[in-house]
Amino acid sequence: MILQALARYYDILQAEGKSAIAPPGYCTTGVRYALNLSEDGELLDIFTKSVEAQRGKKVVEVPQPMTVPAQVKRSVNVAANFMCDNSAYVLGLTDKASRDPDYAAKRFQAFRELNTSVLRAADSEAARAVIAFLERHDPARARDHPAIAGQLEGILKGGNLVFMVERKLALKDPAILQAWEAHTAKSPGPLMQCLVTGEAAPMARLHPSVRGVRGGQPTGCTLVGFNAPAYESYGREQGGNAPVGEPSVAAYTTALNHLLAREDPPPITLGDSTVVYWAESTQGDYAEWFAVVFGGFDAGVAAREARNEAEERLIKIAKKVKWARGLDASALLQGLDPRTQFYVLALAPNAGRLSVRFFIADPFERIIDRIVQHYRDLQIVKEYETQPDAISLHAILGETVSQKAREPKPAPLLAGAVMRAILNGGPYPAALFSAIITRVRADIDDPDARISKINYVRAAVVKAFLIRKVRYQSQHPFKEVLTVSLNEQSTIPAYVLGRLFAVLEKAQLEAIGTVGASIKDRYFASACAMPASVFPVLLRLSQHYVSKAQYGHAIDRRIQELLNLLDVEQQPFPAHLSLDEQGLFILGYYHQRAAFFAKRDGQHELADLADEPIESVITEHQS
């Protein structure tokens, strides 16, 4: 399924003709230097081909992407490429420590033999110039050449080199390209049925490397490969275990490398996974819309300004989304076909291989449906007006780790699991809920470090997790409190106890003001897990605070109202609360605390907005 989708996307890009996708028999790779030769094969000078690129807040030099003949797959073996390779192969120069004194010489010899044999079939001045250079070049004296000595430090750092003849790129010479294509057609693999197309085709023994996955090897990783007898079946080796035709292999690897190298919109990094996405369409709007929703909030985006800009784009797009029972995707995003198939693929490195974290394939309409549902599930009353209406995935994952850690990074597998749940429309992973509960128990309010034990994002995640867990249980009692704002009529003990704790905390605050360690710092974790052991103590303390507070009688009346919602005859304070009930406790506390600060003019009306259109909830910041 994955290979088929990528191969179809390659065909779409080829038919479009506007993209820089490499044709069959070629690939796109970075080139750092070009050796400029005379017509006689003399090395005249070396030009840098690096280009400037924005990397975060810095502008750095990176190799220039260039279409070159398909490169071989190698690890420790000696295998040369045609007309484009590193300095060890092209010049016989390297600064790598090796036990083999002929390390570079062997590689240059392999490069010279391959290139001269292919170029002799090309009748052109450029081909003859490159042949003359390779036959004349001596790696032992290469460092003394003036052109090489001037660029030696940069050349030895790594990167590919290509040839120019009289300042014209040799790889653009039609005779050289024709010779290469004739060479690749000489030795096809055995004829077998291709698993991608179902047709008979020459089988690819090795699949090209995939580059650009974060954390993967610089030389690339393998998506499909078998390198040990334990993985072989019926005597078939390497690619014979999963026969894929050479045209299909070239198509899917080229398309995948293109997606990983794409800059607008770029891949998304989540934990240890790199996420690529595409639509079966020549229009780029599908991928751009998806990138705004997820890519703009990527945990790898360090600049806060970049996140704010992406958030504004999201809000503008989200305002176009009109929620209804029958979702009309054609009305959501003008000019896009809601039936267009859309794909999301998450890859993670595993030594020299790639692991597939998840693969989503759905019509674009359904992708929109699930993303909007995700944001609706997260809707909850805000603590402050300045807080974002649309909570980003980055913000959610950031609340699962301690902000005091040296490197506050979420669990690698958690990010991918959350994104998969969003795109599948299923329950969020239990690990997300557990991590949020753990942080609520462990953290202590610290305004200077911007740490809040229970905040807007954590409460929203708790609500959304429980909503998705009980969504398809029509009679589940929890549903009555999984709302945007306070439910004053609910009698669910865990929710009522959370509200009661917020009232007791307010009593302390009004009586003695801010203290070094409030009852929330001391008792919240215990009250949330074991109410029976804490609430009797808190109620006794509350009488002291009520007597000192200016409006103590109002607080005391609120405490009595909440106690009346509990069944005093059937143990009003449970000995233990389950993990889900602890979530309700947190939600009740948050709802009640938010209700204390509701404005009288109705700007913070505590109404349930769960059934309102999303455009009424997601408002534009500029208004």
Image: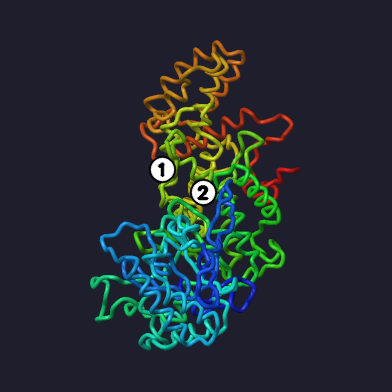
Q: Position of residue 381 (x, y in %)?
A: 61, 38
The numbered dot on residue 293 is: none
Depth order, front residue of 160/487 = 160
Disc 2: which residue: 300
Instruction: Name which quarter of the figure residue 234 lies in.
Output: bottom left
Q: Residues within 10 Å of mark 2 (few under 14, many from 20)?
A: some
Pinpoint residue 564: horizontal percent, then vertical percent: 51, 28
Which of 16/582 is in front? 16
Q: Is residue 463 left or right of residue 215?
A: right
Does the residue at mark 1 contact the one at mark 2 (Cβ under 8 Å)? no
Judged from the image, the secondary structure of the residue bearing numbered disc 2 is: loop
Please name the amino acid that badge 1 sits on.
Ser
Instruction: Using the image, determine if residue 490 lies above or below residue 500.
Output: below
Disc 1 secondary structure class: helix
- Please rate how many residues cluster around mark 1, counting C-alpha atoms within 10 Å: few if below 14, some from 14 to 19, many from 20: some
Residue reaching furthest to the right:
623
What's the amino acid at mark 2? Gly
The spot of residue 105 in percent (x, y) is 34, 68
Labelled disc at residue 434:
1
**Which image quadrant is residue 9 in?**
bottom right
Using the rendered view, name the quadrant where residue 552 is placed.
top right
Q: In the depicted view, which residue is nearer to us: 73 or 609?
A: 73
Q: Quadrant of the C terminus?
A: top right
Q: Is residue 148 visible?
A: yes
Residue drawn at x 60%, y 63% is: 287
Compared across the picture, whether 217 is left or right of 130 comes to left
Please name which of the two marks, 1 or 2, marks the residue nearer to the observer. 2
Query: Does 5 sit above or below residue 154?
Result: below
Q: Residue furthest top?
A: 548
Residue 333 rendering spot, x and y as whole percentages: 69, 62
Q: CA distance from mark 1 to mark 2?
A: 23 Å
